[in-house]
Image (cartoon, rainbow, N blue to C red):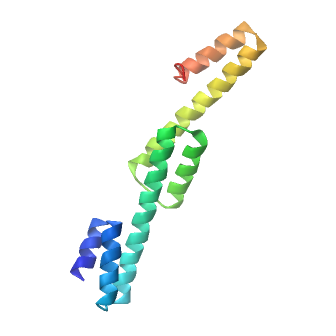
């Protein structure tokens, strides 16, 4: 019982799995084991959300960021990485729009459009992206 409570407090998935298995073997109460299983499921979901967020932030990919944020929100993830990913998504969306505007302006050959697109790119911090 103590091992199960300790494992729940530390929220380590491997430790929780082991403690649940040992608790079952020792005949612990189903309610206690269920609480531990819920803790394990929540921790595994949090870790998966964190992994997806970090991967998307490393790639700086708009679609991956959107998907990871949606996944994390759906799992109830509340870590600071979620807000970091949201901020990065906003930045990357601005950059994407600026790139598109720049391509269109260059294709048009219109100097005013090109100048405006360059300014938009500078505001979005494109800097040679």
Residue at image coords 46%, 63%: 45
Q: Which one is nearer the viewer's eye here, 73 or 6?
A: 6
Relative to 19, is 106 above or below? above
In which quadrant of the rendered view does residue 90 lie? top right
Q: Is 128 located above or below residue 28 in the figure? A: above
Q: Quadrant of the N terminus?
A: bottom left
**Image position, residue 101 (x, y; %):** 68, 22
In the image shown, does 74 or 49 lie closer to the viewer?
Answer: 49
On screen, residue 15 versus residue 42, left or right, reads left
Q: Position of residue 68 (x, y in %)?
A: 53, 50
Residue plotted at (42% across, 64% down) = 44
The quarter of the picture where the C terminus appears is: top right
What is the residue that sits farthest to the bottom in this orientation?
Answer: 27
The answer to whether residue 87 of the structure is visible from this angle is: no
Q: Is residue 55 left or right of residue 1?
A: right
Question: In the rendered image, which quarter is residue 119 located in?
Answer: top right
In the image, residue 57 lies at what x, y percent? 48, 41
Position above or below: 62 against 27: above
Q: Quadrant of residue 33?
A: bottom left
Residue 10 lies, with reference to residue 108, above or below; the image says below
What is the total number of numbered labels drawn onto the structure image?
0
Q: Is residue 129 visible?
A: yes
Residue that appears at 51% across and 39% down: 59
Residue pictured at 52% horizontal, 19% vertical:
127
Residue found farthest to the left:
2
Residue 35 placed where, x, y %? 37, 78
As drawn, the residue found furthest toward the top would be: 111
């Amino acid at each position: 019982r103590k091992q199960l409570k300790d494992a729940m407090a530390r929220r380590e998935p491997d430790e929780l799995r082991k403690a649940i298995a040992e608790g079952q073997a020792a005949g612990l109460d189903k309610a206690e084991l269920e609480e531990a299983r819920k803790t394990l499921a929540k921790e595994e979901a949090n870790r998966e959300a964190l992994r997806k967020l970090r991967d998307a932030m490393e790639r700086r990919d708009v679609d991956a960021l959107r998907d990871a944020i949606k996944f994390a929100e759906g799992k109830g993830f509340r870590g600071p990485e979620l807000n970091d990913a949201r901020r990065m998504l906003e930045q990357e969306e601005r950059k994407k729009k600026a790139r598109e505007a720049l391509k269109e302006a260059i294709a048009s050959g219109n100097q005013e459009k090109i100048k405006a697109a360059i300014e938009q790119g500078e505001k979005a911090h494109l800097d040679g992206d």
